[in-house]
Image: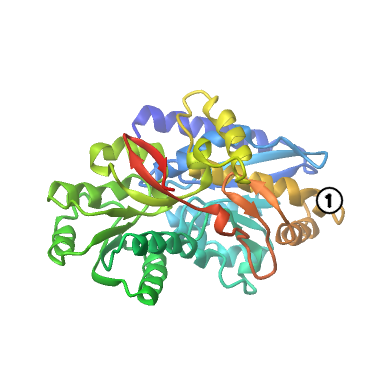
Amino acid sequence: MNRRNKSACAAVLMGLSCLAAGSAQADITVGVIISATGPAASVGVTQQRTVPLLPKEIGGERVNYIVLDDASDTTTTVKQAKKLISDDKVDVLLGPSLTPNSLALIDQMAETGTPMISLAGSGAIVEPVDDKRRWVFKTPQSDGQMARAIIQHMTSQGIRSVGFISFNDAYGEGWAASFRSLAEQVGIKIVASERYQRTDTSVTGQTLKLISANPDAVFIAASGTPAVLPQATLVERGFRKPIYQTHGVANNDFLRVGGKNVEGTLLPGGPVLVAEQLPDSHPAKAPSLEFIRLYEALPNAGMRSTFAAYLWDASLILKAAVPEALKTAKPGAPAFRAALRDAIEGVKDVVATNGVYSMSASDHLGLDSRSRVMIRIENGGWRLVP
């Protein structure tokens, strides 16, 4: 992002923060931490654009949003969450965008009694639901859920060996553990396993090791535009076998940056990505089409993004939970935060863009197999795999 865009982003975020900071104490105050700049900008910027679509009133109470950009940095996330909780007295936190950043906030949420709905993918954010994670929920499908979809597709294609490369962080390690366990169960062998940093500019050494292992396919466990690098290198080095990615690449910046190098990519994704191609019976079709209509009507928003939809789905969960919490306490008090936590845990059958959310005391994601579809990138777009 250039200097002018960064300044514009900062101005928008500051304006939203100032608006919320000057609001009445009785209003519901929602903190939103996203990665609108830094290596994960392609993820967070779509969430930033979604904020104006979020409900301004829930259960008869006005809702104010304080939006902060953590620049994809975990330390910044922790500082921002502390400010939102101690200074701005937020009733709930939406975000962060990334797995490492979300994991870094678990202790803080528990210590302050503040509910959080993460916008990141790793199952470790909400699993297991212990004394700390009881305050944390999330909307993106977990790595374990999506890994099952990948494994199922691989077995249907007769793939018996895989080369694996991932981010060298909590996101990558979560995927490595989930994928390895499921692969072993069906007899798929991981013949090479490599890591790289989100900020790396070359992965030639790692990809040469993957190619030399001669796998039937390669699986890249990364997210956003940094996920293009290993795939582009593989293609440039002549690798012509199937390449799989995670749902962390399901945005149009990945398509734009990857270009022809990502044609044919296979990935699990949320239903919203291919909403028009879903059967009418799919529960996510109608809410997805409505979200797409609203999102793509925003100035300069671009095409749909599952990352934007994760924030939208979080708002739908709040719309279901807040009226229940208001029966117990008023916003701005610890009692309301506790009641809101309980109400989120109790939401049932919230039909959204990524499936149907039904939370419980042991499940702080609440999605089932209807939350995922297999997708192939064809002609620069997303195509549902039957």
- Pointer 1: what residue? 326
Query: In this orientation, which residue lies closer to the viewer: 229 or 263?
Result: 263
Task: Please tell me which residue is depicted at 49% across the width and 44% down the height of the picture.
Answer: 307
Q: Given the current orientation, which residue lies at the most extreme right position?
A: 327
- Are there few (<14), some (14-19), or many (20+) residues within 10 Å of tag 1? some
Q: Residue at x 55, y 24 (%)?
A: 297
Q: Judge left or right: residue 333 versus residue 192.
A: right
Q: Is residue 194 left or right of residue 250?
A: left
Q: Is residue 30 visible?
A: no
Q: Count of labels shown?
A: 1
The three-letter amino acid code for the residue at tag 1 is Leu
At mark 1, the secondary structure is helix
Apparent side of residue 210 relative to residue 189 in the rendered image (left or right): left
Residue 61 in view (yes/no): yes
Residue at image x 65%, y 55%? Answer: 357
Query: How is the model colour-coded?
Result: rainbow
Q: Nearer the viewer, residue 369 or 366?
A: 369
Q: Nearer the viewer, residue 296 or 376?
A: 376
Where is 211 relative to 306, above or below? below
Residue 207, quarter of picture: bottom left
Residue 56 position, x and y percent, is 71, 35
Image quadrant where one finds the N terminus: top left
Residue 303: x and y in percent read 46, 31
| Residue at 33 percent of width and 44 percent of height | 225
Residue 78 percent across, percent down from the top left: 51, 57
Residue 86 in percent (x, y) is at 65, 54
